[in-house]
Image (cartoon, rainbow, N blue to C red):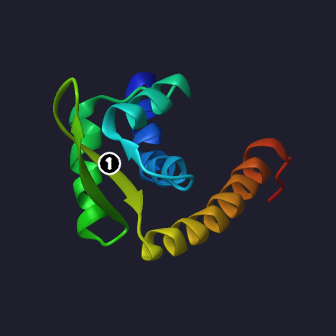
Amino acid sequence: MKIENTKAQMRKGVLEYCILSILKDGEAYTSDLLETLKDAKMLVVEGTVYPLLTRLKNAGLLNYRWEESTSGPPRKYYGLTETGKLFLKELNTTWSELQEAVHRVTTEKTTK
């Protein structure tokens, strides 16, 4: 088993949560999302993010709007819908509970 595969799966598992969290403060262009994720050491590629954005939009969590660009084709800006904001709120709770559970399992001595 290769550690890189496991690390990649862990990142993929939280990518949806990270994208929704980035968008909580306002709309973003896909390259801005990618840059924020890469700055945070979430090693992702466009081929992973675009299908995820489409899936989140189809689920009613995101919307988008087109904006003309002075340096190329129009840009698609994504933002959270009201449903997306509620979904993110629930994910925040779930993430906190998961962090606590993982911390407990990985750091506390367990006895059987």
Answer with left or right where residue 89 lies relative to residue 77.
right
Of 70 and 33, the residue lying toward us = 70
Answer with left or right where residue 66 lies relative to residue 81.
left
What residue appears at the point 26 percent right and 56 percent down from the top-left corner?
65
**Crowd rating for badge 1 (residues with CA inside 10 Å; few <14, some 14–19, many 20+):** some
Task: From this view, report whether residue 64 is shown above or below residue 82.
Answer: above
Q: Position of residue 34 (x, y in %)?
A: 38, 32
What residue appears at the point 34 percent right and 52 percent down from the top-left corner?
78
Task: From this view, report whether residue 5 is shown above or below residue 110.
Answer: above
Of 8 and 38, the residue lying toward us = 38
Task: From this view, report whether residue 41 is shown above or below residue 17.
Answer: above
| Amino acid at dot 1 | Tyr
Look at mark 1 in the image and give the residue it sits on. 77
Rendered image quadrant of residue 75: top left
Q: Given the current orientation, which residue lies at the most extreme front position? A: 70
Q: Position of residue 9 (x, y in %)?
A: 40, 39
What residue appears at the point 43 percent right and 45 percent down from the top-left corner?
15
Of 81 and 51, the residue lying toward us = 81
